[in-house]
Amino acid sequence: MPGQPDGGDESGDSGIAWSIIGTLVAGVLVWGGVGWLVDRWLGTDNVFLVIGLLVGFAASMYLVFVRYGKNPRT
């Protein structure tokens, strides 16, 4: 297209980076939120919040590795 530089695919790389960031943030927020809700339900003092945050981070890192680990273009 006119006006676009020839060569590298920076917009595709940027999309992959934002997808990875979104996956990491969403995993921590969702599982942290589940942990927070369980804490409120059981009346515990942020035990499940911490567990949820750790599980969310680990799960999102696993998903990023599975999806982008071998070939970031797929």
Image (spheres, rainbow, N blue to C red):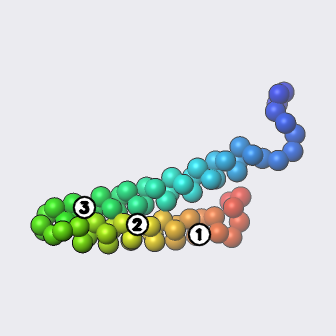
- Distance between the Cα atoms at labels 1 and 2? 14 Å
Residue hosting label 2: 56
Front disc: 1 or 3: 3
Question: Depth check: 26 or 47 in front?
Answer: 47
Residue 46 position within the rendered picture, expressed as x and y whole percent measured from the top left: 23, 67
- The picture places residue 39, in percent across and down from the top left corner, at 19, 65
Please tell me how crowded label 2 is: few (under 14), some (14-19), or many (20+) other residues with Cα within 10 Å.
Answer: many
Quadrant the C terminus occupies: bottom right
Q: Of helix, strand and loop, which one carries label 3?
A: helix
In the drawing, does residue 21 fall left or right of residue 44?
A: right
| Percent of width and height locating residue 57 | 44, 67
Q: Secondary structure at mark 2?
A: helix
Q: Residue at x 46, y 56 (%)?
A: 25
Q: Earlier in the sequence, mark 1 or mark 2?
A: 2
| Residue at the disc numbered 3 | 36
Q: Amino acid at mark 1?
A: Phe
Q: Counting residues from the N terminus, which is met first, the one under dot 3 or under dot 2?
A: 3
Query: Quarter holding the N terminus?
Result: top right
Q: Quadrant of residue 43?
A: bottom left
Instruction: Report how far apart the C-alphas of labels 3 and 2 lie in the structure.
Output: 12 Å
Few, some or many residues within 10 Å of mark 3 (<14, 14–19, 20+): many
Residue projecting furthest to the front: 45
Q: Are marks 1 and 2 in contact (CB under 8 Å)?
A: no
Q: Is residue 42 rendered to the left or right of residue 55?
A: left
Three-letter amino acid code at disc 3? Trp
- Residue drawn where x is 25% and y is 70% of the image: 48
> Height in image: 28 above or below 51?
above
Residue at the disc numbered 1: 65
- Residue for point 85% across, 36% down: 5
Disc 1 and disc 3: Cα gap in Å?
26 Å
**Looking at the image, residue 55 lies above or below residue 74:** below
The three-letter code of the residue at mark 2 reads: Gly
